[in-house]
Amino acid sequence: MSPKTPVVGLLGGGQLGRMLCESGAPLDAQIAVLDVENCPAKQINNNRHHVTGSFKDPVKIKELAANCDILTVEIEHIETEVLEEIDTNGVQVRNADGTTTNKKVAIHPSWRTLRLVQNKYEQKEYLKNQGIPIAEQMAIESGDAMLASMGEASEKFGFPWMLKARKDSYDGRGNFKISNQKDLEQAVKEFGNLSCYAEKWVPFELELAVMVIRTEDDSGKMKRVVPYPVVETVHEDNICSKVFMPPRNVSENVCKKAQKVATSVVEKLWGRGVFAVEMFLTKEGDIIFNECAPRPHNSGHASIESVPYMSQFKAQLTAILDEPLPDVLEPHVSSSIMINILGGADPGSHLPLVEKAKSMYGSRTAVYVHLYGKESKPSRKIGHITVTGFGSITDLEAFAQPLLKMVDAIRQ
Ligand code: ATP
Ligand code: MG
Ligand code: MG
């Protein structure tokens, strides 16, 4: 990238933004971040294009747009009206002589994708109609009709089933497992003011995820979708805690099938960038789509070390800038384990884990610590550890055992 490289505007400057800036640094990429002062991304990337404020504020979004050539996101919960407006009309910029000009700013991924995926119910209805396998779902009425509506869901699906908020959920915060009649009353108390839907319980064997790079030309015609290797994601207390590559005890065939579902999902969305596709794997070997996040994702963190020539963060920049991509994303290691560092009961609960990780050197294995510059709070994602190896995932899991035990202890 030359000094004339376009300025990339980033909505949100958390850990994903920070790692995007890390991957952009050797490329001289200019990344302007809209978020609070001293957010994780700004801590490591000093430039005059940053904007201080909330990525939920349309005025600030326009201010950022005026500072950059292309807008992207590290979070999907963004006001899309203003993005649509910028995409359609461009943004006003003030010239040195006091006059104003209208500047075109590209938005990737498209606001259409963001708008669709923000509503998890609509996201799945759309993809179901495009032939993607999903768990059965039904709309739930809100307000006074909620209880009766949930009764219908109980009859239709049987216990347990999952009540989900359509919007703004992450780390399982918008989910409520309904196991009995009593849960229904509690759910009305907790979710009564939200727009919700019901989802059939999926008794999955395990969860899989695939990151997919998507590019398209300036007219919006899809050019390429390139999938990363499949990973197994483990969720504890509804938060992703560990990620294994390759998935443990999953056949090559099933992995191929998961990649196929993931690429089909991403083909049906709009814009350039990386997209995470979360899926369930059933006992019968069926893949069921769970949800898609159109941005770098926790399940792709190990790509920093396992696919070092094209991590998911570099891929986000490469795709939105429409630069050359490889045909296949072949890992440089045979196995990897990503372990999230979550804040524990005390601000220092995670420190022994970090010290242990820094001290571990094995034969043909490597341990990488990533800290996000965030204050520790219980269950908050404050860093991650990636362990890579040249042997089997079973051997690597044995090597990583001390770390796996320590993270489990922090959660207790
Ligand atoms: P994220 O942080 O990934 O955005 P989220 O808040 O959007 O999470 P989901 O992905 O819908 O939530 O669900 C979180 C986790 O809850 C899933 O990864 C899975 O472990 C479990 N889960 C979700 N839906 C179901 C279901 N229908 N049946 C069984 N388990 C489920
Ligand atoms: Mg989600
Ligand atoms: Mg999820």
Image (spheres, rainbow, N blue to C red):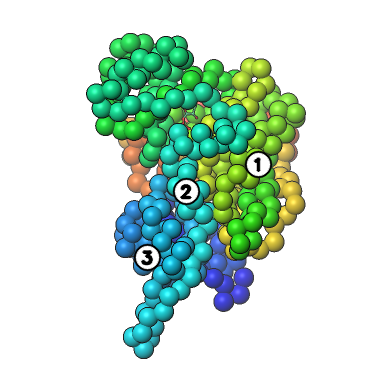
Within 10 Å of the Cα at label 3, are there few (<14), some (14-19), or many (20+) other Cα atoms? Answer: some
In terms of sequence position, does the residue under pointer 2 or pointer 3 come before the other?
3
Residue drawn 63% across and 45% down?
267
Quarter of the image containing the C terminus?
A: top left
> Marks 3 and 1, Cα distance to the nearest angstrom?
32 Å
Query: Above or below — where is 351 with respect to 280?
Result: below
Q: Give the residue pinned by disc 2.
A: 114
Callout 1: SS = helix
Within 10 Å of disc 1 (Cα), the crowding (few <14, some 14-19, many 20+) is many
Q: Provide residue 221's location: percent of width, then percent of height.
A: 64, 56
**In-front residue for pair 48/285:** 285
Is residue 166 visible in this depiction of the protein?
yes
**Given the current orientation, which residue lies at the most extreme bottom position?**
97
The earlier-in-sequence mark between 1 and 2 is: 2
Task: Specify the label residue 263 is tagged with.
Answer: 1
What amino acid does circle 1 point to?
Answer: Thr
Q: How many marks?
A: 3
The span from disc 1 to disc 2 (Cα, nearest Å) is: 17 Å
Q: Which residue position holds label 3? A: 62
Picture disc at residue 196? none
Q: Quadrant of residue 198?
A: top left
Q: Is residue 318 visible?
A: no
Q: CA distance from mark 2 to mark 3?
A: 17 Å
- Can you give x and y, in whole percent of width and height, for residue 67 in the image? 42, 71
Quarter of the image with the N terminus is: bottom right
User: Helix, strand, or loop for circle 2?
Assistant: helix
Q: Position of residue 228 (x, y in %)?
A: 66, 43
Residue at left 47%, top 48%?
114
Mark 2 neighbour class, 10 Å CA radius: few under 14, some 14 to 19, many 20 or more? many
Identify residue type, mark 3.
Lys
